[in-house]
Image (cartoon, helix red, strand yellow):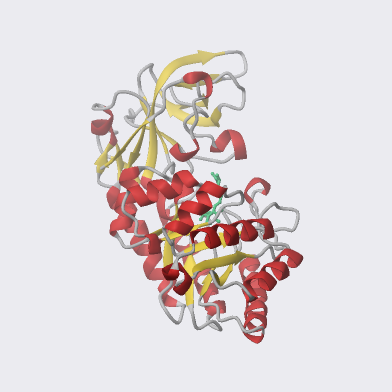
């Protein structure tokens, strides 16, 4: 079991400092429960580790797509971490919550005119460009917004490269291959440089990559950093003076293992950052999952027990409408009973949700002790891509969210 969880002597599940049996006695329905203490711990571990191998401390921008809960984001903002946003909605939320414009990066593959206008008018830290058409659009917007002051301080853009590198993650969340929709193709990149050479309202802040998500093998980063080095040398030769190098996010966690394994994963990945020390500017990192996944659980109740000749089902009052990851990526999330009789034997159950699809299954062959209707279970590691991917499908209510 993940090292943030343990059972006390009464068979009640502890999650970090929280007794989940006590927590659930106050809840009205399915709830994403976030621990600020675990969140703080993860932010600290990450920030400390990534500093070790780089010449200068990197700047961290949390990928808001992993979790857009206002309390979680507030907490992150207070630690002086910025945000990476991918839509006008996320950008507006960041500004609304008081993230300073220079703490915001705008990534995203399909930015609308309105979204770009907002980002340009608020002069955010960097807009990461994904295609030549987007750069032309931004130029036009900048020239419309132009005043003597914008003229003096051009907007910083990052060029997101598609380096045709396969990070070997799940195909649905791998983004760095040339068959993927992300990043600039080599010819679009050259077109962008041509445009930027003569454009005074925009300046090339730097290059950016994002190879994919839930990456656990880091050879791909090594190849990417070597290619970035080549590109940087070329840029200087062409007369550009890039100040940032944005390596995206993607660091995975061990959903089958514990926080201890995560730290080893982090150490290994961070060691590879030394491959960026050719660069004298500022390294930017956009982690999502690693920072928040472990700090959240989804708490749900058993609605029914159901049995057929083949197996027993545990039907919960929460399903793929709240946590889509198992249905979409076959991903594994450990499931624990919030209160468990320690002296009874466990049986195997298929743990499912109430949604009218067979893909609405959280886990098969899960060992559960003597369950009853109304019992609470905790689905682990739901702080990342849990509530942020939930939907109104079947019109069940959304899960509540609380950070303690
Ligand atoms: N930066 C960019 C440009 C991204 O597209 C992403 C994630 C990140 C940073 C953060 O990546 P992370 O550190 O969280 O791996 N829904 C999927 C994950 C999709 C990730 C999309 N992009 C899941 O539940 O596994």
| Residue 288 visible in image | no
For the point 53% across and 61% down, the residue is 142
Residue 380, image quadrant: top left
Residue 209 x, y percent position in the rendering: 60, 64
- Asked whether 45 or 80 is in front, the reply is 80
| Residue 107 visible in image | yes
Residue 204 vs 128, above or below: the answer is below
Residue 237 x, y percent position in the rendering: 66, 86
Residue 379 vs 317, above or below: the answer is below
Residue 262 x, y percent position in the rendering: 46, 58
Looking at the rendered structure, the number of numbered marks drawn on it comes to 0
Residue 334 vs 171, above or below: the answer is above
Residue furthest bottom as drawn: 237
Q: Is residue 146 left or right of residue 216?
A: left
Residue 199, image quadrant: bottom right
- Asked whether 281 or 366 is in front, the reply is 281
- Asked whether 281 or 403 is in front, the reply is 281
Q: Is residue 185 left or right of residue 318?
A: right
Q: Is residue 246 left or right of residue 132?
A: left
- Asked whether 79 or 154 is in front, the reply is 154
For the point 50% across and 38% down, the residue is 389
For the point 62% across and 23% down, the residue is 358
The C terminus - image quarter: top left
The N terminus - image quarter: top left
Residue 46 x, y percent position in the rendering: 40, 63
């Amino acid at each position: 079991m993940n090292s943030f969880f343990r059972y006390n002597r009464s068979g009640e599940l502890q999650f970090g400092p929280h007794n989940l049996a006590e927590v659930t006695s106050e809840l009205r329905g399915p709830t994403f429960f976030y621990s600020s203490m675990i969140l703080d711990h993860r932010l600290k571990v990450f920030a400390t580790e990534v500093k070790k191998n780089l010449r200068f401390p990197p700047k961290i921008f949390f990928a808001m797509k992993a979790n857009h809960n206002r309390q979680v984001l507030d907490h992150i903002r207070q630690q002086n971490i910025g945000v990476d946003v991918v839509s006008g909605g996320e950008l507006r939320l960041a500004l609304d919550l008081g993230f300073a414009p220079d703490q915001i990066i705008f990534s995203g593959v399909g930015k609308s005119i309105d979204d770009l206008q907002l980002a340009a008018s608020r002069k955010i830290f960097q807009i990461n460009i994904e295609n030549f058409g987007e750069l032309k659009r931004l130029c036009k917007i900048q020239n419309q917004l132009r005043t003597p002051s914008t003229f003096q301080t051009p907007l910083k853009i990052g060029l997101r490269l598609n380096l045709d590198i396969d990070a070997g993650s799940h195909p649905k969340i791998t983004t760095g291959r040339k068959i993927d929709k992300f990043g600039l193709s080599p010819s679009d990149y050259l077109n962008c440089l041509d445009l930027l050479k003569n454009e005074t309202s925009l300046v090339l802040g730097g290059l950016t990559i994002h190879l994919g998500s839930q990456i656990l093998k880091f050879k791909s980063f090594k190849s990417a950093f070597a290619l970035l080095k080549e590109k940087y040398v070329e840029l200087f030769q062409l007369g550009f003076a890039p100040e940032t190098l944005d390596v995206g996010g993607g660091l995975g966690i061990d959903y089958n293992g514990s926080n201890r394994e995560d730290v080893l994963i982090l150490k290994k990945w961070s060691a590879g950052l030394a491959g960026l020390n050719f660069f004298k500017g500022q390294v930017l990192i956009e982690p999502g999952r690693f920072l928040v996944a472990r700090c959240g659980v989804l708490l749900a109740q058993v609605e029914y027990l159901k049995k057929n000749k083949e197996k027993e089902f545990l039907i919960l009052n929460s399903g793929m409408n709240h946590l889509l990851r198992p249905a979409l990526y076959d991903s594994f999330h450990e499931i624990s009973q919030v209160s468990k009789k320690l002296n009874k034997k466990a049986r195997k159950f298929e743990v499912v949700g109430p949604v009218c699809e067979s893909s609405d299954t959280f886990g098969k062959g899960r060992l559960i002790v003597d369950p009853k209707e109304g019992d609470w279970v905790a689905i682990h590691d739901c702080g990342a891509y849990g509530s942020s991917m939930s939907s109104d499908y079947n019109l069940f209510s959304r899960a509540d969210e609380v950070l303690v």
